[in-house]
Image: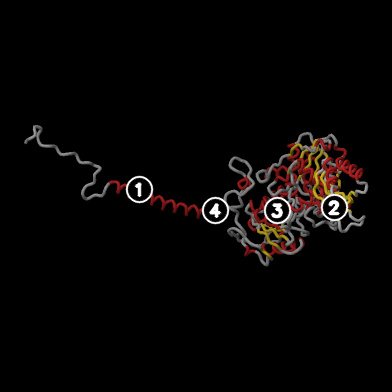
Amino acid sequence: MVSLWGPPKARPMDMTTPGPFLPPYGVVVGVLLHLVVYLVAVLYSYAEQLLLKKDESKIKKQDTPALCDLHCCKDGLMRNGLIGQKQPSINPERLKDFGEEDYLNGDVKTWEMKIVSRNEELLRDALSRIPQSSSRTSLSSCNKLIRFEDISAAAFKIQCGVQKTPCMYSRLSKQYGMDIYLKKEFLQYTGSVKERGVLYLLTSLPQDQQRKGVIVASDSNFSMAVAYHAAELRIPVFVIMSTSTPPARVKMCREYGAMVISYGTTAKDSQTHARRLAQENGYLYLEEEDSAVYLSGLGTVGLEVYEQVPKLDAVIFPAGGHCGLLAGSAAVLKHLNPHISVIGVESESFPVLQQSLKAGHPIEDQACSNHHFYGDVSGLCFGSNSLQLTGKLVDKVVAVREEDILISILRLLEYERATVDAEGAIGLAALVAGKLPELKGKRVAIVICSGNLELHLLQQCIARALTLDNRVCRFSLVLSDCPGDISKLLEILAREETRVLDIKQERTFVTSELFTVEVTCTVETRDKIHTAQLRNALLERYPTATWIER
């Protein structure tokens, strides 16, 4: 049958359908996409290799990074921590006969070095105003007193690297009858005010010396600050510690980024070994002294206190042999307001500063304590520059007992929730001991400069301070060994609202009558008045009761 519409028309060719000799179009597109991705990956890998080579060439030529680049974020806020990649570790092959090294963490990166002169001359570029000396260390004392401009420059340079710690009104004010403001320098990253002087000192070193590295020999707050800030600035740092150093300090110093080496049984052995390593390897041996740079960094505390507390009447600082904080801060406070009283406080057992001021020169043969509780409080007087500044600018230096320091540690822990050591609490100890009655009714700032107290010492200090504060007491009495006698004693203690900490009974070694028991009780009271009330109640019921004095 023939269609009326004529022969059927051919369908138009479907462009999405491949011809008989061509693959499907989806396959073609997939292959092209895989090819594009492969090319992009190859180009990216090649570009990454070029960037790595470029960065390595920059690192070799680049000087030490700026301080603010290491410590500041993009928005200008300070950050105490590691920025970016981990600091380069130190090559142990550079040490010759280093002694007893435990381990070395991290990658190793070295710099070529050449010793061209003595270590005493390495700071000459940065400290051109300071005459060099070959006496105790490579950082020598400055015969010229530091100026306010020096401290202002130090404050500007270290502002990104250290905390601007708060200076807050204290709840202890009512107890001591004056407005007390506490400058909490123990909140620094390493728990010490020494960071200020150390950071300014390290940033003032010549660049070639920063590449070679520095070395210190102690477990003091100064060494901890050097370990942390040198690592932050990517300066190779070695810390030589004696084998008697507490393990916690060794661990902390390693975590800061330093190479810690255990050598010798005394601090003198460690110092001798560190000096020898410095001479053989070109490191700069650092020791806490009163160079102008170090004192200027410490003096920034006084500048901050003056800015934070208006209308100050007096500022109290820790003193002792290491009086750099007192001297540097006094320079700026007296410049800003000569009427502010600057007061130093040292230990009565180690009156190094008072004896040095009386003699007119640093006393080096003064006996000092190696116990970790005292820290820098019992150190030797380390320079004539600090002594000269102290004698000229400080209004008063007082000495306090060890008992007053312990009670100050307890007060700060209770009222401020601040855990500090002897150096940090010694300023408040002057008020606890009543050595400054002229400050009643005035506005006083106290610098709490350190909070590095070992845990086992903290426990001992608190227990001893509670006893000294008449809040833990002990008594003994003899009772008949009959049922109910102990319960009657406990009823009296409960009626007087005391807390029994310990109770012991002795029946065998009793020198009194037969069938008696000697009872020894340790109790906690609220204060001195409460202790007196308990004592009277016990003597009224047990006349033979014996109060065990502390």
Q: Which residue corresponds to mark 2?
A: 352
Residue at mark 4 to residue at mark 2: CA–CA distance:
51 Å
Residue at mark 1 to residue at mark 3: CA–CA distance:
58 Å
116 displayed left or right of 509: left
Q: Amino acid at mark 3?
A: Met
In this view of the protein, which residue sits in the foreground, 548 or 417?
A: 548
Q: Nearer the viewer, mark 4 or mark 2?
A: 2
Image quadrant in which you'd find residue 310: top right
Q: Which residue corresponds to mark 4?
A: 58
Q: Which residue corresponds to mark 1?
A: 33
In this view of the protein, which residue sits in the foreground, 216 or 290?
A: 216
Q: Amino acid at mark 2?
A: Val
Q: Residue most toward the left?
A: 1
Q: Indicate which disc, 2 or 1, sits on the residue closer to the N terminus.
A: 1
Residue 534 is tagged as none
Judge the density around disc 1: few (<14), some (14-19), many (≥20) Cα neighbours within 10 Å. Answer: few
Residue 224 is tagged as 3
Q: Amino acid at mark 1?
A: Leu
In this view of the protein, which residue sits in the foreground, 348 or 336?
A: 348
Q: Nearer the viewer, mark 3 or mark 2?
A: 3
Residue 538 spot, x, y in % from top left: 89, 44
Judge the density around disc 3: few (<14), some (14-19), many (≥20) Cα neighbours within 10 Å. Answer: many
Residue 450 spot, x, y in % from top left: 75, 48
Q: Indicate which disc, 4 or 2, sits on the residue closer to the N terminus.
A: 4
